[in-house]
């Protein structure tokens, strides 16, 4: 049966049900990269380098499980669809991991931390890969895909805001203990995930696979290698994810040791993500006018311009200057969240036309690997800092950093300078991206007209 490419706008009810779980999923993503490294090193006393290596190992584990889960979810048969069974199985694994990581004993072992991180990454993969692929398949329209990604990522930012604000709210209420903060985050994740995932599974339909056959290994790999937009996008995506992963991994340490206020990270993160959420409608509207890839390029240019000032205007006590940088860079992150995901869905159409199989899960798995590889590389910043003599627990009696200036300089280079260089490479890759609205509509029309390869 042919589908109407132009008449594919989702109802508000379906879009709301699809977007709802993104809040809990985002809360699963933020803590491992922003809160947990500092929590397990500064508060619980685990070695900084060891925690970094555990996070790196979990990301490498993801590199093995992602393509397997993506491919299996593409080919899962049955009356319940291809995506729903995987999400139903992944949710309990993620919830158990939340309990292990967010409610640790007084003196946790490195092994307990490793078990929790590995379980969390597996559960999150089983949730997010089918979820993202499902969203990409809900519509074949170039601009409707931006709308779907915008709602998903906007709701995800709401979850991120909850995660970022809970520690500040608890501290303001007279509860400064990080252990209580993490336990509260765990309770919030469980309370949001259970009903929202149930709503998604019950209320959102899965479109039937848009394919004329199943690609063999040789022909499927040939189609993958020949997909030039895919190669270009995934490289830009990897580089930009690394550029974002470095400051995400080092944010809490940067605020505590460079600015000198260990309690300021929560309101600064809140301002950052509020700015990103508020900017999503702007980036979506601009993408309708000049295209998704060019809009993404402009957003990265803006982020580079902002971060380039950080080494010159941010030092001890400069919270106001860093607040401005956080807000302006947060505006750019709204585009980082929405536009690459929408472009990814378009690139899958190129593969479907060439291979004859709609391998959305596999493609999002490959992009997932790129993301997790980027954050794994970003986690290497922790042992690099340790090698440079940086100590996450080094504070004097007044609560100010006791690290040497060369160690703080290494922190500044990894946090603010290296991301600008990386984003500049990503901009060069996406600026003249070859898949625009007209080309995507042409490819999609051929697929839905039965002209895909068999």
Image (tube, grey):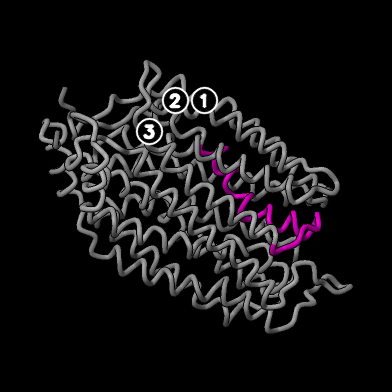
Element carrying mark 2: helix
> Given contact means CB atoms under 8 Å apart, are the residues at marks 2 and 1 in contact?
yes
- Badge 2 is on which residue? 84
- Answer left or right for 239 relative to 317: left
The range drawn in magenta is: 22-49
- Answer left or right for 129 relative to 7: right
Dot in front, 3 or 1: 1
Displayed quadrant of residue 432: bottom left
Name the foreground residue: 127 vs 4: 127
- Badge 1 is on which residue? 88
Q: Above or below — where is 90 with respect to 242?
A: above
Mark closer to the chain start, 3 or 2: 2
Residue 71 image position (x, y, % from top left): 37, 36
- Badge 3 is on which residue? 134
> Given contact means CB atoms under 8 Å apart, are the residues at marks 3 and 1 in contact?
no
Mark 3–mark 1 distance (CA, rounded to whole Å): 14 Å
């Amino acid at each position: 049966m042919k589908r109407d490419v132009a008449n594919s706008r989702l109802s508000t009810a379906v879009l709301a049900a699809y977007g709802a779980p993104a809040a809990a999923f985002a809360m699963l993503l933020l803590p491992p990269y922003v809160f947990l490294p500092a929590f397990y090193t500064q508060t619980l006393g685990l070695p900084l380098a060891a925690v970094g290596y555990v996070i790196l190992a979990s990301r490498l584990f993801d590199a093995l499980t992602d393509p397997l889960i993506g491919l299996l979810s593409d080919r899962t048969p049955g009356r319940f669809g291809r995506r729903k069974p995987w999400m139903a199985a992944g949710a309990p694994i993620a919830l158990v991991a939340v309990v292990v990581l967010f409610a640790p004993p007084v003196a946790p072992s490195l092994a307990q931390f490793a078990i929790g991180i590995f379980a969390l990454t597996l559960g999150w993969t089983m949730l997010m890969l089918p979820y993202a692929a499902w969203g990409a398949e809900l519509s074949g329209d170039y601009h409707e895909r931006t709308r779907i990604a915008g709602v998903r990522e906007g709701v995800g930012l709401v979850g991120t805001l909850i995660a970022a604000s809970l520690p500040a709210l608890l501290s303001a209420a007279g509860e400064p203990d990080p252990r209580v903060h993490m336990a509260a985050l765990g309770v919030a994740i469980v309370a949001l995930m259970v009903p929202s995932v149930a709503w998604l599974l019950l209320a959102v339909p899965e479109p039937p696979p848009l394919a004329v056959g199943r690609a063999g290994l040789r022909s499927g790999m040939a189609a993958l290698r020949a997909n030039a937009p895919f190669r270009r996008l995934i490289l830009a995506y990897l580089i930009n994810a690394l550029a974002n992963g470095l400051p995400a991994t080092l944010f809490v340490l940067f605020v505590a040791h460079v600015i000198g206020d260990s309690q300021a990270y929560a309101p600064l993160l809140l301002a950052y993500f509020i700015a990103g959420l508020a900017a999503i409608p702007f980036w979506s509207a601009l993408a309708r006018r000049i295209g998704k890839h060019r809009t993404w390029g402009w957003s990265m240019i803006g982020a580079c311009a902002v971060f380039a000032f950080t080494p010159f205007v941010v030092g001890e006590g400069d919270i106001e200057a860093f607040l401005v940088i956080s807000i302006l860079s947060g505006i750019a992150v709204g585009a980082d969240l929405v536009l690459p995901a929408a472009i990814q869905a378009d690139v899958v159409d190129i593969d479907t036309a060439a291979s004859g199989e709609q391998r959305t899960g596999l493609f999002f798995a490959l992009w997932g690997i790129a993301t997790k590889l980027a954050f794994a590389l970003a986690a290497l910043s922790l042992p690099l800092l340790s090698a440079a003599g940086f100590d996450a627990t080094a504070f004097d009696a007044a609560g100010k950093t006791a690290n040497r200036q060369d160690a703080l300089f290494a922190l500044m280079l990894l946090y603010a300078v290296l991301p600008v260089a990386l984003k500049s490479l990503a901009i060069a890759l996406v600026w003249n991206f070859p898949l625009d609205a007209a080309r995507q509509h042409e490819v999609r029309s051929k697929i839905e007209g039965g002209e895909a390869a068999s």
